[in-house]
Image (cartoon, grey):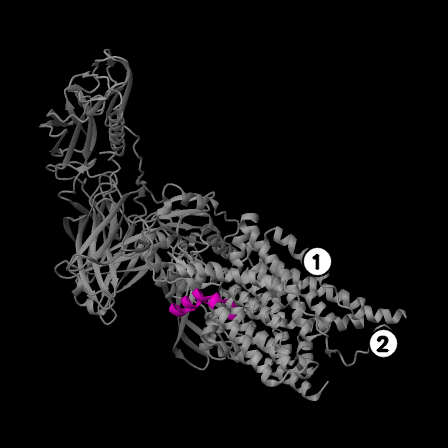
């Protein structure tokens, strides 16, 4: 219960106490109203008896007050009572107060989805790597607790769309999706009928796969260059990714951390005959070359 | 005016003067420290005293006096001499102060001597040690120092092509398709972690990998937990880590818990932090001629070469040392107190604890850099 | 007839009101310009006063060192600043208190000097007080409010001590005891060392004078001396009880912090200029006279000995006296206060010299002395401009830093500054955030700060390795203290921050201040320090020291009974014949 709701409940209790306290008003009266309505719908409350009175509708986060004449009807227009929950309808006047309960349920038609998609960035080819969670609300931001089917769709330009349908429980539904094999910005959509909410999930290349380098002489040095660095799905590993070249010779070694530029990593290192040159990126090892010249 | 009064005045005056003379000729250690370790009259009557006086003048930044006392001052200018000590480019040495020095005789004859001067510079990142072997020559009744000045390194004119790789961060606007969650911290992973008990306390060694495609600003915290899972102590990696990690880059980390006992520790909670930051792939630093030197003075030596076109003001060389099974057994580092000029090698020498040296079979070196423009 | 009048005129004291007017003319404009704000410690005292203003009965101040107790420093001048601040504002209240202390010093020196020299010479001493370099140095360069407030109170107490011991006057006993107590609550070191430099010579003087006029037997003399000592000690013990408790429970055992006043002023002439030439000024020329006259006039010998010891200690490491007499305290105390006391002790001699010179050389002497006095004072006042105490913070405006800390919840974390010099007290006063740094070294208890021998972290690099070691230790333990922000006004610290895991997140004050932050630092929580004084100590601290000063004012209103002055023989130059003065 939010603070505001708690305050409203307290206010309701105070009003009920006030109404009960007016015991001197002996004239009888009555209330006729539906026991349940949908949030935002119009309805009327019929009173009986005579004389002027005041009608209070007190509920979570909302209080409505109307002056009524005994025997007349109070009309509550559409959209006036919009917060779902339990309400008290209290009629005070010259006689004893009259109280009745009123239940306001969320509207049946979903109008908004609160959609949380995580992560916003992940490597390609990850099973159940993407999580989507949806909360379903009506037009008045009431959580629709009635079961509703939610379609989750993950689409990418180069891959067939993944879809899941999940029935909400207590207003929420969640699912897990696989990241696709191709890098790019995928659209992750949650849909109930015509109501949709979209998030973008960036799918990025994974670890380099089959890292290969070649060596060629460059004066007194050896020029090392990788083949275009790609992950296991064939996506180009982005520029800036660090590739480590290590050259071991005798009891010494040389190391250079080189960022990939234009798809390849290249560096010139001292040429030591018999040196064993290896390449790696992160925890992925590439090939080794023994430099004999 | 009585005679005893006059005598008293003379005595008080004489005692005052005597006390001043004593305090000046044999100053207290505090007073001597303020005088840069120099007495009233600098004496260069021996080679060692000549070197000591020179070091004291360097410590007090009395460049003119120090330069003036050199035997070979005609070979370079005072500015060259000063820059040789404080750096030609902005570096750790620029703001360093001389904490103390040692002088060791290497060789001496009647007319010349070889002396080793070890200068302990206090820099913001710790003590930096530099050693100079000096030739000292006799000149009449005093000795003068031949200062082996290292002239300004000449970087040959050249064009260094830089395809400037840089990441900037654009934060999302409210209500767009990226939602709230897209400024996501880079994904980093601890790929190795290993606690060891050392004399100075419990040390946690490990490696951290940036497995994302964006650069990460990282640090690692560790909390030691006892048998009831209550925290014993908490500490961070401080400067024994490379805080900027480019995609797929690995850094070692070293966390020390002084005075802790590994036997009291039931488990360790590791907390890596990563933040998405703007970063640059430059400068690229090559490490050349890495060599693991065995006991009795185990160390990792080598050279770092700045392959970019910009000057790197401060570099921190971090070595990760592995045993035969590939497990991290030690992490150590050294700050270079000279600026890294383009294509100009600078030597490093990372000390390795002697008891661990025999277990080490391989190493990996990374270099964290700082340039005055504000990027690391 | 005319000659006779002239002789009388030349022996008449200069009215004390004239000296006070002169002190006002010299110092009031400087105070209104708030010149002391440039000094080393003025902002520190205002910061303490600011805490008293808001928490008069709670001496625990969380704004520095993650919390420290202000009972570690006698509070009287700061409490007066706090008390006056609703009228003047904190800064101007400080100026008012400091100005009052300057005026009180003129009166105190006059009364003290009258014990030793003729009223006319004493009036010259009072006049010379206005120009004493040591006073100007402490007020405008060092900002030592405690010392400069305690000394005049102490000097004003000494004649009552003399009166009590010499004549057994109960009123003098009361006034001496209350004034000594008030002086102690202003500055404890003044009381401690003042007892040796000032009180012992006065007691010796009273003993020498015991057989003149109203005689006093030696047993009575001893009994009176003991009585005033015991009662004053008890009063001080009570008035500063929380201070003593803090000192006993948490003695200052931290690694000593270097201070250039302990240098040898010959080997380090730059510090000789700062701690000898500037404070003494032209008084140096009078040193031979002081030694000569003090030795040859038996009555002045106690004063000479007091001066001599203070003078030697004030020379810092120039002589071995400081390390020998003070022991470890030599590494803790700063020596400029000894020069200040030595200068005050020299003033009766200066008054004597001036009166004799004026009597002998008339206008020439007046001109010469005036020039010497003006240069001494002017040089000492201007010195704060030449050797700036601001520690690299010249032109730094900390308001933008304070505003940054006070917004967006930044004050949930602690901060530290680098390169802010003496502005950290000003910043601490303006911001709601707490710091792990501070300027009151004796009050700090954090091991990262006490272990190495560095001073304030903001000046780390000036303390070389110890200072930088302390800074690195504090940055290492940043999480423990909730230390998230580092404000840098000196880029030489940037490499350390960059390599230690801090990131620049903002810049302030036209990019002259960089804000660095560390990720993952938990919000600061109050440290449950055992040093937090209990409530009763806070109440005592709020009542006793300030109350002692109020009591001192009240007892001074009690009129003195007129006593028939015995013919007092004052030291004069034996060669000076009055008839020749006008011849």
Q: Is residue B48 visible?
A: yes
Q: Above or below — where is C566 with respect to C460?
A: below
Find residue B101 and report its image quarter.
bottom left
Q: Which residues are magenta?
A: C238-263
Return the residue nearer the eye: C156 or A161.
Answer: C156
Q: Above or below — where is B274 with respect to B232?
A: above
Residue corresponding to mark 1: C21
Q: Position of residue C365 (x, y in %)?
A: 77, 68
Q: CA distance from mark 1 to mark 2?
A: 32 Å
Find residue C533 and report its image quarter.
bottom left
Q: Residue furthest top?
A: A72
Image quadrant in which the N terminus of chain C is located = bottom right
Q: Of helix, strand and loop, which one carries label 2?
A: helix
**Viewed as shown, does residue C483 lie left or right of C268?**
left
Q: Position of residue B324 (x, y in %)?
A: 13, 61
Q: Is residue B338 magenta?
A: no
Residue at 18%, 49% (x, y): give it.
A279
């Amino acid at each position: 219960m939010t603070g505001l709701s708690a305050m409203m409940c307290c206010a309701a209790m105070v009003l009920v106490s006030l109404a009960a306290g007016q015991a001197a008003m002996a004239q009888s009266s009555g209330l006729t109203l539906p026991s349940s309505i949908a949030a935002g719908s119009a309805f009327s409350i019929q009173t009986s008896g005579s004389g002027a009175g005041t009608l209070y509708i007190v509920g979570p986060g909302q209080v409505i007050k109307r002056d009524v004449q005994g025997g007349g009807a109070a009309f509550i227009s559409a959209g006036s009572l919009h917060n779902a929950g339990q309400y008290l309808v209290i009629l005070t006047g010259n006689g004893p107060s009259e109280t009745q309960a009123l239940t306001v349920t969320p509207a049946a038609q979903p109008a908004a989805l609160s959609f949380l998609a995580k992560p916003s960035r992940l490597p390609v080819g990850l099973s159940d790597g993407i999580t989507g969670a949806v909360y379903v609300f009506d037009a008045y931001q009431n959580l629709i607790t009635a079961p509703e089917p939610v379609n989750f769709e993950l689409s990418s330009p180069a891959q067939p769309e993944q879809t899941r349908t999940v029935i909400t429980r207590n207003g929420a539904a969640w699912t897990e999706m696989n990241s696709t094999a191709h890098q790019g910005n995928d659209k992750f959509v949650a849909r109930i009928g015509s109501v949709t909410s979209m998030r973008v999930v960036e799918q990025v290349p994974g670890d380099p796969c089959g890292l290969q380098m070649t060596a060629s002489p460059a004066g007194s040095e050896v020029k090392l260059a990788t083949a275009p660095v790609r992950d296991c799905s064939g996506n180009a590993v982005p520029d800036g990714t660090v590739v480590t070249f290590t050259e071991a010779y005798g009891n010494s070694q040389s190391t250079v951390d080189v960022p990939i530029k234009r798809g390849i990593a290249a560096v010139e290192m001292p040429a030591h005959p018999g040196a064993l040159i290896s390449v790696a990126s992160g925890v992925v090892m590439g090939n080794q070359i023994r430099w004999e010249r | 005016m009585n005679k005893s009064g006059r005598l008293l005045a003379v005595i008080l005056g004489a005692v005052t003067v005597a006390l001043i003379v004593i305090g000046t000729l044999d100053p207290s250690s505090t007073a001597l420290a303020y005088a840069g370790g120099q007495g009233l009259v600098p004496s260069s009557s021996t080679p060692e005293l000549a070197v000591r006086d020179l070091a004291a003048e360097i410590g007090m930044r009395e460049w003119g006096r120090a330069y003036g006392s050199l035997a070979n001052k005609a070979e370079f200018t005072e500015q060259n001499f000063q820059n040789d000590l404080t750096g030609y480019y902005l570096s750790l040495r620029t703001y360093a102060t001389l904490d103390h020095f040692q002088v060791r005789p290497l060789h001496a004859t009647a007319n010349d001597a070889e002396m080793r001067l070890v200068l302990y510079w206090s820099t913001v990142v710790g003590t930096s040690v530099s050693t100079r072997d000096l030739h000292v020559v006799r000149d009449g009744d005093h000795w003068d120092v031949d200062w082996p000045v290292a002239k300004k390194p000449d970087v040959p004119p050249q064009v260094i092509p830089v395809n400037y790789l840089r990441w900037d961060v654009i934060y999302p606007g409210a209500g767009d398709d990226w939602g709230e969650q897209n400024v996501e911290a880079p994904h980093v992973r601890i790929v190795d972690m290993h606690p060891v008990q050392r004399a100075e306390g419990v040390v946690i060694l490990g490696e951290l990998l940036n497995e994302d495609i964006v650069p990460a600003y990282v640090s690692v915290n560790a909390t030691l937990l006892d048998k009831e899972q209550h925290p014993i102590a908490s500490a961070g990696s401080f400067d024994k880590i490379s805080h900027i990690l480019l995609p797929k880059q690995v850094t070692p980390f070293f966390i020390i818990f002084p005075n802790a006992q590994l036997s009291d520790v039931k488990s360790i909670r590791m907390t890596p932090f990563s933040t998405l930051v703007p970063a640059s792939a430059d400068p690229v630093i090559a490490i050349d001629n890495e060599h693991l030197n065995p006991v009795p003075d185990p160390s990792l030596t080598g050279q770092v070469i700045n392959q970019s076109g910009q000057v790197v003001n401060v570099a921190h060389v971090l070595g990760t040392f592995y045993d035969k099974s590939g497990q991290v057994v030690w992490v150590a580092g050294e700050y270079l107190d000279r600026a890294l000029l383009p294509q100009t090698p600078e030597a490093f020498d990372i000390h390795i604890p002697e008891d661990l040296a025999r277990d080490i079979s391989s190493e990996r070196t990374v270099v964290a850099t700082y340039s005055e423009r504000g990027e690391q | 007839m005319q000659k006779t009048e002239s002789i009388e005129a030349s022996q008449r004291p200069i009215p004390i009101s004239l000296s006070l007017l002169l002190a006002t003319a010299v110092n009031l404009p400087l105070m209104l310009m708030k010149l002391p704000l440039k000094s080393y410690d003025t902002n520190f005292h205002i910061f303490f006063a600011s805490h008293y203003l808001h928490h008069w009965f709670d001496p625990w101040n969380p704004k520095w060192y993650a919390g420290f107790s202000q009972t570690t420093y006698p509070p009287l001048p700061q409490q007066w600043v706090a008390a006056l601040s609703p009228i003047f504002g904190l800064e101007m209240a400080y100026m008012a208190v400091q100005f009052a202390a300057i005026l009180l010093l003129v009166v105190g020196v006059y009364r003290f000097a009258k014990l030793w020299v003729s009223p006319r010479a004493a009036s010259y001493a009072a006049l010379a007080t206005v120009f004493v370099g040591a006073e100007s140095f402490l007020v405008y360069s060092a900002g030592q409010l405690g010392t400069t407030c305690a000394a005049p109170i102490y000097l004003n107490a000494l004649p009552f001590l003399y009166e009590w011991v010499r004549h057994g006057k109960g009123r003098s006993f009361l006034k001496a005891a209350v004034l000594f107590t008030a002086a102690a609550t202003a500055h404890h070191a003044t009381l401690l060392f003042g007892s040796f430099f000032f009180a012992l010579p006065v007691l010796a003087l009273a003993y020498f004078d015991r057989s003149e006029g109203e005689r006093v037997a030696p047993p009575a003399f001893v009994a009176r001396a003991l009585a005033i000592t015991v009662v004053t000690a008890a009063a001080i013990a009570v008035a500063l009880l929380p201070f003593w408790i803090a000192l006993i429970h948490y003695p200052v055992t931290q690694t000593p912090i270097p201070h250039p006043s302990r240098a040898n002023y010959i080997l380090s002439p730059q510090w000789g200029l700062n701690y000898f030439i500037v404070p003494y000024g032209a008084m140096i020329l009078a040193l031979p006279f002081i030694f000569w006259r003090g030795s040859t006039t038996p009555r002045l010998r106690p004063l000479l000995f007091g001066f001599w010891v203070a003078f030697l200690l004030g020379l810092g490491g120039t002589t071995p006296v400081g390390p020998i007499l003070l022991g470890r305290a030599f590494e803790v105390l700063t020596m400029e206060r000894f020069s200040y006391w030595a200068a005050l002790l020299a003033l009766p001699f200066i008054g004597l010299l001036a009166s004799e010179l004026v009597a002998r050389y008339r206008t020439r002497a007046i001109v010469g002395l005036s020039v010497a006095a003006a240069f001494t004072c002017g040089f000492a006042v201007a010195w704060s401009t030449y050797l700036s105490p601001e520690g690299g913070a010249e032109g730094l405006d900390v308001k933008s830093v304070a505003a940054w800390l006070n917004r967006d919840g930044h004050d949930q974390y602690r901060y530290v500054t680098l390169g802010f010099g003496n502005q950290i007290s000003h910043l601490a006063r303006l911001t709601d955030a707490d710091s792990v740094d501070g300027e009151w070294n004796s009050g700090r208890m954090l091991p990262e700060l006490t272990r190495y021998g560095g001073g304030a972290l903001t000046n780390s690099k000036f303390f070389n390795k110890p200072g930088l070691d302390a800074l690195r230790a504090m940055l290492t333990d940043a999480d423990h203290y909730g230390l998230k922000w580092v404000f840098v006004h000196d880029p030489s610290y940037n490499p350390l921050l960059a390599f230690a895991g801090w990131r620049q997140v903002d810049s302030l004050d036209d990019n002259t201040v960089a804000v660095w932050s560390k990720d993952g630092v938990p919000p600061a929580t109050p440290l449950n320090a055992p040093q937090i004084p209990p409530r009763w100590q806070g109440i005592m601290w709020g009542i006793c020291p300030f109350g002692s000063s109020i009591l001192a004012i009240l007892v001074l209103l009690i009129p003195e009974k007129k006593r028939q002055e015995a013919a007092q023989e004052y030291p004069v130059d034996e060669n000076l014949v009055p008839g020749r003065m006008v011849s």
